Every structure is written in C-alpha cells, then in structure tokens.
Amino acid sequence: MNGDDNTLSQEEIEALLSGMGGESKDNGVSAARESGSRSLADADRKVLEDIFMSTSGNSGTILSTIINKEVDITFKSISLMDAEQLKQTSQYPMILLEIKLISGFDSMYYMIMGEKEVHSIGESMTGNTPQNTTYDVFLNSLVDGFMQMVSSSSTGLSMLIGMNVDVSAPVISKIDSSGGFSRKFSLSDPVVAVTYKIKIDADIDSELIEVYPYGLCMDIVSAYRNKHAKHAPKQAIHEEEKIGVQPVKFAPLQEALGQELPKNIELLMDVPMNITVELGRTKLSIKEILDLDAGSIVELDKVAGAPVDLLVNGKLIAKGEVVVIDENFGLRVTDILSPEERIKKLK
C-alpha cells in the first residue's frame, strides 16, 4: 500500500490476484475462474484498455483547467478482483466518489482517491481546506469540479461506443474503515479495477482507481463491438468458378519506375516538402465553434482504428496507422501511391 496516496497500489493488486497476498478460499481472480463465475478474456481486456486509455486524457485536461495546475492522468493497468478483496486490502481513510449512470447503462461506478490528493485538489479548486470548514462542507464543495471531470469521461465513452452515456453528480464521502466501505460498496460480483497514474505539478505523483461492476464492463465491451462492427469493411466473396477469377500480373517494378520518372527528377531531390498526417475532418457551425472550450470533444469523420492520411503539400499520397516512437507520434505507412503517381500529385 502506498502510504502517501491512501489507495491500493498496482503491485498489491497484482500480488493479490496472483495469490501472493495470502490464502483465501473464495477471493481472487484465480478462484473466480476455477469456479467458472467470472473472467476477463484477453480480447475484452484489450477493448477496455483502449477505452480507458482514450478517456483518461479528457479527465486530466478538465481537472487541469479547473485547478489551474498541470495535471496528467494516464492509464496504468486493469485488474479483475472481488469487491471484498478491494475492501480488505485498502488503506483507510480514503475518499470515495460514487457516480451513477443515468443514461446508456443502469449502473454505477466508483472512484477511489487518497485523502492527500483530494485535499490538494480541493484547496486548488475552491480555496477551502478541511481545517477552515467542516469536512462534509469541504467535500461537497468539490462536487461541481469532479462532475465536470466525470462528465468529460462519459462524453468520451459515448463517442467510442456510439451511444449516449450521462452521469449524475458524484456523491463524495470519506471512508474511515472497512465497515464504512461495506456500507457504501455493496457489490457482491467481481469488479474491474482500473488504475491510473495521476501527477499534479510537483505536488502529487500518485494513483487513483476507478472501480466498475463486472457486468457494466461487459456491457461497455458489447456496445463498443456493436458500433465498430457496423463500420467494419465487408469481405468480398469471390465465386471463382462463375466469374473466372485470375491472379493479377504486375509489371516488373524497376522497369515501370524507369519509364515514368522524369529525367531531371534528380535536380529536385533535395527540395523540402511539407508533410501532414491528418487524423480526420469534420464541419462545425459558427455557433459550435464559438461554444468550444477546454475539454470539448470534436468528433471526426474517421472511425477509430481507420487508417489516417499522409499528405504532401496538402495532397494525399499515402495512408497508415499511428505509432509511438519514444515520446513522439509517427506513422507506419500501409498504403501508398506509386512513385509515378506521387510525382503527378506534386505537379
């Protein structure tokens, strides 16, 4: 347990799940799998990881705007565990946010933060501290700020799964003991614990955990797959016997290049060109543009996972997929025009 952030660390989660945290007859993912009750398949885990990675940045941006500090919230890991395990291994006191989904899904999820982190955020957000007001008043003063934060995440989730997801204002409370945890956290099924790294200027370098009912996560995965199945390209079915499909014969590559490239192309080889990688486009009305604010999300015309465009001086020459090289974005080219066609594009 991280003594500074008052939350369950990822190392402890992993130790717990692998049976290193002590023997138990009924607790743990391994026990759940052996009994056939619940499991998190690799494909489901990957979908959830992609979703939570995508939405965590929205939360960090909103919180940064609210408290006027540099905030970085990044996805770290995802684990399946029993709510009882989470209760027994958590350190108290903790701050618990209860967030009810009021459209899209009929469920709730929770956010667990350390008391130190919440005090720091609260002081920056409202100017209040637990020392100059009652603790309940202090926590209630944070509701609007955290509401903006979780609303931003739900908006991002809505776009990823293709259905509207709204949340109610979070209920914030301090949990002093495992008994208080049980009264607030009455889930009996396994839960999905999503751990994030949170950094706030030089003050905070810690973790926060979001806890989702297992069934809610499976519903999210199903909605995500349904949306992307609609946009998946249909595979062509070739009836070879009826239409006489023949293999394509290509001319030798070097021969084609020698015939088409201009003879004086060598004179232009060192001329610099502007390269742009375009993620997507959309159209907004003037009103929509004026309504944009920090934390706003603009939906583009490309489906998540679709190839992005590579343009040279504004002209499309290739498509590819975004990759990360060290700390920079890059593009892995998957489809590109021939050199002759590229030359024509640049004229």
Image: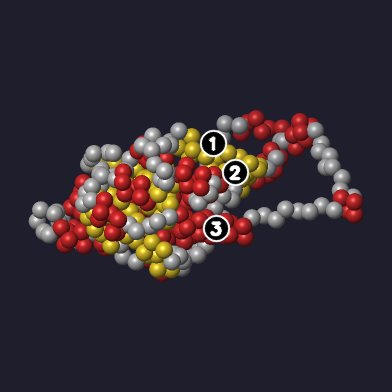
Q: Position of residue 214 (x, y in %)?
A: 45, 54
Distance from disc 3 to disc 2, alpha carbons, whole Å, reads 27 Å
Q: Residue at x 42, y 46 (%)?
A: 26
The residue identified by callout 1 is 272
Disc nearest the viewer among 1 and 2: 2
View extreme (front): residue: 25
Chain-order first, disc 3 or disc 2? 3
Image quarter where the C terminus lies is top right
Distance from disc 1 to disc 2, alpha carbons, whole Å, reads 21 Å
How is the structure coloured here?
A: secondary structure
Chain-order first, disc 1 or disc 3? 3
Q: What is the three-letter code of the residue carrying label 1?
A: Pro
Q: Position of residue 176 (x, y in %)?
A: 21, 52
Q: What is the three-letter code of the residue carrying label 2?
A: Gly
Chain-order first, disc 1 or disc 2? 1
The residue identified by callout 3 is 222
Q: Residue at x 30, y 62 (%)?
A: 170
